[in-house]
Image (tube, grey):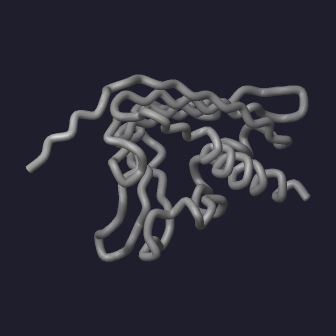
Amino acid sequence: MAIVNEPTMTASFELSVEISAPLAEVWRSLVDDIALWWPPEFFTSDKSKGILLEAFPGGRLFEDYGEHGGLLWYHVVAIEKESSLLLSGHLLPPFGGPAVTSLRLVLSKSSSGVILTIHDAIFGAVSGYDPVDDWRLLFEGGLKAFVERLKQ
């Protein structure tokens, strides 16, 4: 058996997304309607039946494979209605880890609607890992597109 030691690092990433919609609508879409805007390419398995967010402290953000199967993305650490969502999860080796990730989503009003700021802090084997393009796909291509389409 070979033992490979990965360097342990910390990394922080941030992305802001401007969404032209009322704060309450963006919040509701973020926490209640996640299954409606989560892009299919973000699912980790062809068994995925959907994504679920239990929007309370201790709740889970997870992919549901059915029959009690699935993949846990995050646990909800803190939630402030229409303001912020703090999630903690494990970045497993098939997805770029092993590492621990703390994802904070902050909503703030802007002149044209809402600014969603995504803060991702990662500790572990994260050399070369950069989630910003993935967050852009998820939150611009998924959430923002969904919410702004509702306005039309």
Looking at the rendering, which quadrant does residue 119 occupy? top right
| Residue 106 falls in image quadrant | top right
Identified at 47% across, 25% down, the residue is 11
**Which quadrant is home to the C terminus?**
bottom right
Q: Residue furthest front?
A: 2
Question: Is 90 placed left or right of 82 in the picture?
Answer: left
Rendered residue at 41%/66% (across/down): 64
Q: From the top left corner, tell me how far across and down residue 75 is, in percent.
A: 38, 42
Instruction: Name the spot of residue 110 as percent of width and height, x first.
Output: 83, 27
Q: Residue at x 48, y 52 (%)?
A: 53
Residue 112: give x, y in percent of width and height: 89, 33
In the image, 16: left or right of 125?
Answer: right
Q: Nearer the viewer, residue 113 or 45?
A: 45
Q: Residue at x 44, y 31 (%)?
A: 102
In the current view of this chain or complex, which residue is farthest to the left?
1
Residue 48, horizontal then vertical, whole percent = 45, 71
Q: Nearer the viewer, residue 137 or 110?
A: 137
Residue 97, placed above or below residue 150: above
Q: Is residue 83 visible?
A: no
